[in-house]
Amino acid sequence: MIENYNNVRAVLNELRQALKQLRETGATYSIYIEKTGLAEEEQVEVLETLGRGHITITFNETDQPVEWYESQFFWHLGWYL
C-alpha cells in the first residue's frame, strides 16, 4: 500500500504538463514509467490511472520482449510501455 502519493502525483502532473504542451505547440513527449524511480506499487498506481485502451502491441523479436498499451485516454495521452 502506498503511504505517500507525492511521487505518483508528480508523474501524473508531468504527464498533465506534457498534454498541455501537446495542445499548445504539438510537442510530443515520452516517459518510461519503469525509469522514473517510482516504487513498483507507485508504477502500478500510475498505470492504473492511465488505464488500458483496446489496443496492445507486442514485440517479441528482441532479447527483452516489450508491449505498448494504448491508454484509456488515447486521444490525449496515447501509448505507454
Image (cartoon, rainbow, N blue to C red):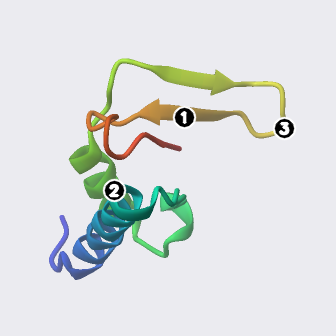
Does 3 sit left or right of 40 as displayed?
A: left
Mark 3–mark 1 CB contact (< 8 Å): no
Residue 68: give its label: 1
Snapshot quadrant of residue 55 = top left
Residue linked to disc 2:
23
Judged from the image, the secondary structure of the residue bearing numbered disc 1 is strand
| Residue under the image location 71 percent in, 33 percent down | 65
Local crowd at mark 2 within 10 Å, few (<14), some, or many (≥20)? few
Snapshot quadrant of residue 12 = bottom left
Q: Nearer the observer, disc 1 or disc 2?
A: 2
Residue 31 coordinates in the image, percent (x, y): 51, 61
Q: Which amino acid is tagged 1?
A: Trp
Mark 1–mark 2 CB contact (< 8 Å): no
Residue 22 coordinates in the image, percent (x, y): 40, 58
Is residue 2 shown above or below 65? below
Q: Nearer the observer, disc 3 or disc 1?
A: 1
Q: Using the numbered discs, state the Cα–Cα distance from disc 1 to disc 2 in whole angstroms.
A: 23 Å
Residue linked to disc 3:
63
Q: Which amino acid is tagged 3?
A: Asp
Name the residue nearer the viewer: 52 or 4.
52
Q: Using the numbered discs, state the Cα–Cα distance from disc 3 to disc 1 in whole angstroms.
A: 16 Å
Q: Which amino acid is tagged 2?
A: Arg
Name the residue nearer the viewer: 75 or 68.
75
| Residue under the image location 42 percent in, 40 percent down | 78
Local crowd at mark 1 within 10 Å, few (<14), some, or many (≥20)? some
Is residue 2 shown above or below 76? below
Judged from the image, the secondary structure of the residue bearing numbered disc 2 is helix
Say which label, 3 or 1, has the lower sequence index.
3
Judged from the image, the secondary structure of the residue bearing numbered disc 3 is loop
Quarter holding the N terminus is bottom left
Q: Using the numbered discs, state the Cα–Cα distance from disc 3 to disc 2 in whole angstroms.
A: 36 Å
